[in-house]
Image: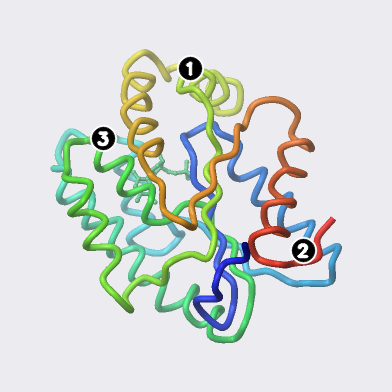
């Protein structure tokens, strides 16, 4: 069954734990669209705007002086600006938007910090504020594997330890509980190209694009 088109354009979101390979898979999907002659708008959250920069600063320094509610308000402010300035104009112009993280991350991560997940969802799904994606691809990995990948990839990743893994377990539980009609779970273990091919098939089946 194909999904109903919700906007003029198509809105595809990638979600997953840190180290799930989201960013790589976003690029693979963008390349598949390019091969089909379709340009996409690739974007991400947190953004590079003022709120996004603030969020990255907090992430670098640690969460010591900030409450979960404040942290969530930064993500939501960042999203508001992102939707107004990038996502909605692109969708209104009929483009395909590929976004690395969106409000499902807020439900999963800020939910793992103790905020009420239903309330986060409610705030983010107020009609006409944040467009609902046509498709969410969730890259499913075990927290331990995510932590290993972060260690392999990032400078200073050696400091990523037990605490992070325990936190990611809670985040994963929150992602696992999601079952919206637009939410597709992809096992993100194994070969990068095989995972990319699975995603291309999902986009082809769900949204009707002739991708290879
Ligand atoms: P990134 O590593 O994909 O750039 O994401 C940065 C971090 O921000 C990641 O640990 C997840 C977190 N995050 C939230 O906690 N809430 C949100 O709403 C978003 C978009 C990201």
Q: Which one is nearer the viewer's eye here, 63 or 145?
A: 145
Label 2 – label 3 distance at C-alpha: 34 Å
Q: Which residue is mark 2?
A: 33
| Label 1 SS | helix
Q: Which residue is mark 3?
A: 112
Query: Which residue is at 85% across, 55% downward?
Result: 212
From the top left corner, tell me how far across and down residue 117 is, in percent. Answer: 22, 46
From the top left corner, tell me how far across and down residue 57 is, in percent. Answer: 34, 45
For residue 148, above or below residue 4: above
Query: Which residue is at 74% across, 51% downward?
Result: 201
For the residue carrying disc 1, how many other residues have a C-alpha within 10 Å: few (<14), some (14-19), or many (20+)? some
| Label 3 SS | helix
Determine the image quadrant of residue 129.
bottom left
The tag earlier along the polypeptide, 3 or 1, is: 3
Which residue is farthest front? 1
Q: Which disc is residue 144 wearing?
A: 1
In contact (CB < 8 Å): disc 1 and disc 2:
no
Query: Which residue is at 34% across, 39% downward?
Result: 59
């Amino acid at each position: 069954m194909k999904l109903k088109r919700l906007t003029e354009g198509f809105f595809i979101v990638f979600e997953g734990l840190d180290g799930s390979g989201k960013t790589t898979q976003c690029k693979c999907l963008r390349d598949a669209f390019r091969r089909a002659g379709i340009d996409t708008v690739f974007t991400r959250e947190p953004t590079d705007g003022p709120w996004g920069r603030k969020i990255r600063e907090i992430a670098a320094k640690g969460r010591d002086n900030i409450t979960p509610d404040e942290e969530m308000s930064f993500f939501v402010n960042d999203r508001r600006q992102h939707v107004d300035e990038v996502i909605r104009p692109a969708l209104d112009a009929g483009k395909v938007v590929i976004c690395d993280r969106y409000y499902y991350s807020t439900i999963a991560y800020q939910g793992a910090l103790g905020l009420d997940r239903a309330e986060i969802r409610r705030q983010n799904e107020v009609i006409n504020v944040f467009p609902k994606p046509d498709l969410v691809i969730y890259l499913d990995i075990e927290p331990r594997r995510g932590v290993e990948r972060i260690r392999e990839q990032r400078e200073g990743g050696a400091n990523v330890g037990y605490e992070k893994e325990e936190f990611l377990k809670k985040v994963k539980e929150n992602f696992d509980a999601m079952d919206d009609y637009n939410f597709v779970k992809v096992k993100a273990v194994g070969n990068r190209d095989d995972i990319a091919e699975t995603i291309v098939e999902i986009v082809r089946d769900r949204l009707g694009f002739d991708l290879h």
